[in-house]
Amino acid sequence: METFLTPDDIWALSFTITGRCNCNCSYCHFYSGRNRNDFNLDMSPELFANYLKLVKHIQKHYHSNLQLRFSGGEPLMLGDKLFEYSTKIYEETGIKPFVLTNGRLITEDIIEKSIKGHISAYLVSIENPLDEADGAPKTEEVLNKIKQFNSSDINITPAIMIIKNKYFKDIPYIADYIYEKIHILPSFAELTYQAFESPTDSELSDLYQSVKLLAKKYYGKTPIRIFPYISPELFAQGHRNYLSELNLENSLQVNGEKLDSAVEKLFFQLNKSYRPNPCTDTNCEWYDDCRIIKWLWMEKFPNSEISKEQKLSDFCRMRKTLNTALYDGIMEAQHTI
């Protein structure tokens, strides 16, 4: 079984622990193509146990540099079962899982149970304060939760914030607004999948200026995470990080036996999700950094007018802009020290 993973690469395995959610975010990709009522259920203890066997098998025989996370739906809707699962994971793998959440159910009691249950962190979804989506928690609500509960015992930090193209110019303002309140930046994320929009030259100019200012002001002060599908190594602070899902549907057909077969399916999915970049421009200064890219940059989505050729071109334009801006900003920051 071959894969592009190297020993230093981080492989994140995501337990989709529930389909239930206490929000109704208009952009939610989890329910895209799914009937919400059909997924009003939790992962069964049996499926969780089989997935844990698979994780231990991978850790022992294939790849030890793993991250484990709980996603959904809203994982905190499991109640105490979530902490039973996290404790089991830690006891059997030594890995403390983190949780993707909308944050609404985080309380002092939840924090105490999380610490005892070996949860490493909560990554809380956060809205662009200039463009709050219907059905999602308000930006101020999330900021107040983070400010109240983030501590040295358990990290409560902002997760991704979707930035539409027309808001590229506002990234420095948004960064200052968030940092002033919680002393950390959100993880800025680009539009992807069906929502993707080809950036204009003017929007790319805005992106360059904004990211350059961001790097110049915040480099060395707080992590800068931006556009994970364009420049994942920047988003993961220099690491190459790849994600696979252990879903509610058990599409891998994991049953606690024939674990090598399940790993083979995971590797097959991984190789479909992250593909060799067909670009042959070896003179590009970023050529060596993007040999493997996310599949979505090479596919045309239904009901989208953007061809796969245009998508790949847009990826290239955005990556060059983003990487160059970050580099230029860091250089200017260092020269002013």
Image (tube, rainbow, N blue to C red):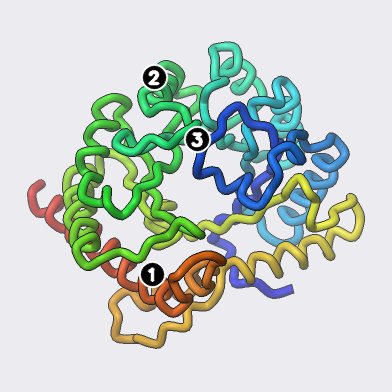
Q: Residue at x 39, y 19 (%)?
A: 144
Q: Residue at x 89, y 50 (%)?
A: 256
| Residue assigned mark 3 | 123
Q: Earlier in the sequence, mark 2 or mark 1?
A: 2
Question: Which of the two residues, 170 or 12, is positioned nearer the viewer here?
Answer: 170
Disc 2 and disc 3 in contact, CB within 8 angstroms: no
Question: Which of the two residues, 171 or 22, is positioned nearer the viewer here?
Answer: 22
| Secondary structure found at label 1 | helix
Q: Residue at x 42, y 72 (%)?
A: 311
Tell me where residue 47 appears, x and y as whole percent: 84, 42
The answer to whether 36 appears left or right of 145 in the picture is right
- Mark number for residue 144? 2
Kind of residue at badge 2: Asn
Question: Which of the two residues, 56 or 13, is positioned nearer the viewer here?
Answer: 13
Q: Earlier in the sequence, mark 2 or mark 3?
A: 3
Tell me where residue 191 appears, x and y as whole percent: 41, 54
Q: CA distance from mark 2 to mark 3?
A: 14 Å
- Mark number for residue 315? 1
